[in-house]
Image: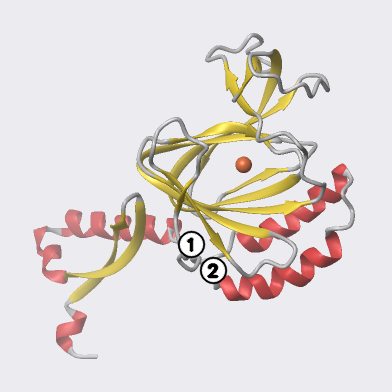
């Protein structure tokens, strides 16, 4: 290493590589900035330390994820009880949360799950027992709240930030007639960032929706079908802004088309 190289300090910089998709890139800054004084230098070191605490480590490639997850899920998929789904989802998530990046899909298609354009879905092959769908949300767009009633889901954040909410029905009425008023319970309200995970089983957290922040968001849904596809289409849900019971997070809601 030359003296010249020693004159530089590494920093990490976040750069937008596509609309709403960010990568963290390592760059060098000239050490001479330390001449601004000991205080300035200490500040730089503090910033470097902060980056070191937030930069993920122990990541695996998508191919290595498939090598681990395909045999693992084969052994766990048969138990579709509530506990069996929990075990399946947590086991799958423990590998999925380490994925460094996912190959670009052949095509990005409109999600059809949004009131306005700007939400996209792309299929990524390789799952034997599950389907990997990438989703990409432009800034301030939304995937509507919808129910899963035949496949469970592991969601993993890859870039950007999205608010994810999960709900469950109060009671077991499964009449999805549009306009029908029901009660739901919010079970999760989460800021999904890189490497964070949100789980949907057929018995828990089975209604979910996503709202992207000002930087957009990118992630994957790993879906496993464990029941036959029902005759009805995807049930969408509209939820009141204000909780009817704040502590229990009970809301009035209605099914929508
Ligand atoms: Fe979904």
How far across and down, in percent of the image, does residue 142 sit? 46, 35
Crowding near the residue tagged with mark 1, few <14, some 14–19, many ≥20 C-alpha atoms within 10 Å: few
Element type at marker 2? loop
- What residue sits 81% from the left and 47% below the top? 228
Q: Which residue is mark 2?
A: 59
How far across and down, in percent of the image, does residue 130 sit? 70, 60
Residue 147 in sight here: yes
- What residue sits 75% from the left and 42% below the top? 201
Locate residue 14 relative to residue 255 in the image: left or right: left
- What residue sits 70% from the left and 35% below the top? 205
Q: Which mark is residue 253?
A: none
Seen in the picture, residue 132 relative to 152 is either above or below; the reply is below
**Which of 47 and 210 lies nearest the eye of the viewer?**
210
- Identify the image quadrant of the C terminus: top right
Seen in the picture, residue 137 relative to 183 is either above or below; the reply is below
Q: Which mark is residue 56?
A: 1
Q: Do the residues under discs 1 and 2 have CB atoms within 8 angstroms?
A: yes
Task: Find residue 119 and report its image quarter.
Answer: top left
Seen in the picture, residue 172 relative to 130 is either above or below; the reply is above
Task: Find residue 67 and report its image quarter.
Answer: bottom right
């Amino acid at each position: 290493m030359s003296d010249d190289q020693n004159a530089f300090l590494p920093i990490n910089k976040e750069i937008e590589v596509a609309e709403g998709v960010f990568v963290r890139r390592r760059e060098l800054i000239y050490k001479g900035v330390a001449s601004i004084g000991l205080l300035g230098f200490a500040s730089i070191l503090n910033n470097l330390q902060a980056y070191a605490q937030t930069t993920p480590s122990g990541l695996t490639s998508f191919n290595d994820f498939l090598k681990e997850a395909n045999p693992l899920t084969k052994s766990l998929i048969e138990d579709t009880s509530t506990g069996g789904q929990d075990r399946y989802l947590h086991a799958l998530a423990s590998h999925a949360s380490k994925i460094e990046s996912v190959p670009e899909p052949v095509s990005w298609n409109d999600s059809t799950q949004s009131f306005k354009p700007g939400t996209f879905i792309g299929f990524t092959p390789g799952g034997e027992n599950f389907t990997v769908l990438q989703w990409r949300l432009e800034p301030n767009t939304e995937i509507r709240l919808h129910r899963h009633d035949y496949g469970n889901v592991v969601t993993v954040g890859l870039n950007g930030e999205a608010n994810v909410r999960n709900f469950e029905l109060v009671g077991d009425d499964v009449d999805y007639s549009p306009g029908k008023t029901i009660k739901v319970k919010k079970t999760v309200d989460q800021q999904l960032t890189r490497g964070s995970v949100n789980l949907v089983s057929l018995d828990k957290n089975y209604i979910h929706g996503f709202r992207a922040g000002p930087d957009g968001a990118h992630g994957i849904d790993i879906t496993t079908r464990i029941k036959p596809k029902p005759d009805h289409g995807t049930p969408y849900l509209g939820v009141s802004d204000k909780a009817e019971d704040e502590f229990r997070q009970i809301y009035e809601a209605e099914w929508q088309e």
